[in-house]
Image: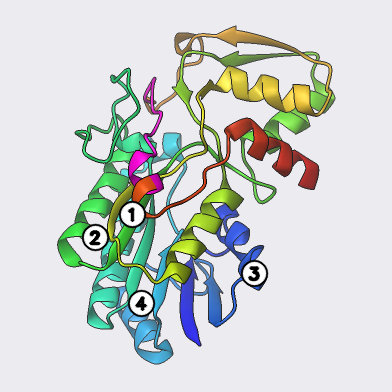
Amino acid sequence: MKKVLITGGEGQLGQSIRSLTNNYTGYEFIFLGSKDLNITSRVLVIDFFKQHEIDYCINCAAYTAVDKAEENPEFANKINVEGVENLALACKTYNVTLLHISTDFVFDGLSNLPYTEKNITNPLSVYGQTKLDGELIISKTLSNYYIFRTSWLYSEFENNFVKTMLKLGKIKDKLTIISDQIGTPTYAVDLAKVLLDTIDSDKHNYGCYHYSNQGVASWYDFAKAIFDIKNISIRVEPIPTTSYPTPAKRPTFSVLSKEKITNSLVVNIPYWRDSLKRCLNNL
């Protein structure tokens, strides 16, 4: 019985992983939220690993409040860098394979082609920089690790863009949505399956991988699809990013190339609109 620790277990990706665990036998899954294990405390992290004989750690814990990170960079750094370093050191000490979640925000969005794992990183925000710093610590500390960069996560769990649109669709006649930020929505349950399949395959194709659903969309396209699939009658108007300034700058283009993960980990990646239909049916 192999033990799999999921940090950030109460978030939407952690809950998405939990929703699939019955499909994987031979594992004991341990889901911990920040109240159960404070990853910013090296002593607590090392002690937990020492006591529980972990085989795999899936780190879903992160400071993801992109705009608030601009005002509170120390707190973002505490979780996204120091916390990650603590987990990496514990994994090294106790020979644990780490699966870590990162972001498309490590790129500046100036490309017009999907980003590969070899493209140069250049974060535009504190959030993006702290996530990149976490990646660098993992790659320097460990040899048995996976980093999965993803984008625009949503699910049935916790707060996210899909749930926000559904709430607004009930009370608004019109919405304005940004149309010049291009990426790919990613269903967290699809990513969760990739994480669990990676463990279950027992392959050792370690390294950094990009995973999002297939296809390309703007936030405007994403919102329109939600309302179309749910047959919600609402007027949606496209606006440029300049009409909705935020403290943190976002990449205007952050489509991720899935060529490496498709070839190396042999994953089947659904089209974003098909996964959105599955999520909306579950909701």
Q: Secondary structure at mark 4?
A: helix
**Residue tagged 4:** 45
Which comes before the other along the chain, label 2 or label 3? 3
**Residue tagged 1:** 147
Answer whether labels 4 and 2 touch (C-beta < 8 Å): no
**Residue tagged 3:** 23
Q: Secondary structure at mark 2?
A: helix
Q: Which residues are magenta?
A: 251-262
* x, y percent for residue 85: 26, 64
Mark 4 or 2: in front is: 2
- Which residue occupies 38% across, 34% down? 256
- Which residue occupies 45% across, 10% down? 242
**Residue tagged 2:** 138
Residue 237 can be seen in this image: yes
Q: CA distance from mark 2 to mark 3?
A: 29 Å
Q: Which amino acid type corresponds to the residue marked 4 in the rendered image? A: Val
Which comes before the other along the chain, label 3 or label 1? 3
Q: CA distance from mark 1 to mark 4?
A: 20 Å
Which comes before the other along the chain, label 4 or label 2? 4
Q: CA distance from mark 2 to mark 1?
A: 9 Å
Q: Nearer the viewer, residue 16 or 26?
A: 26
The correct choice, above or below, for 6 with respect to 55 in the image is above
Residue 61 placement, left or right of 179: left
- Which residue occupies 64% across, 69% down? 23
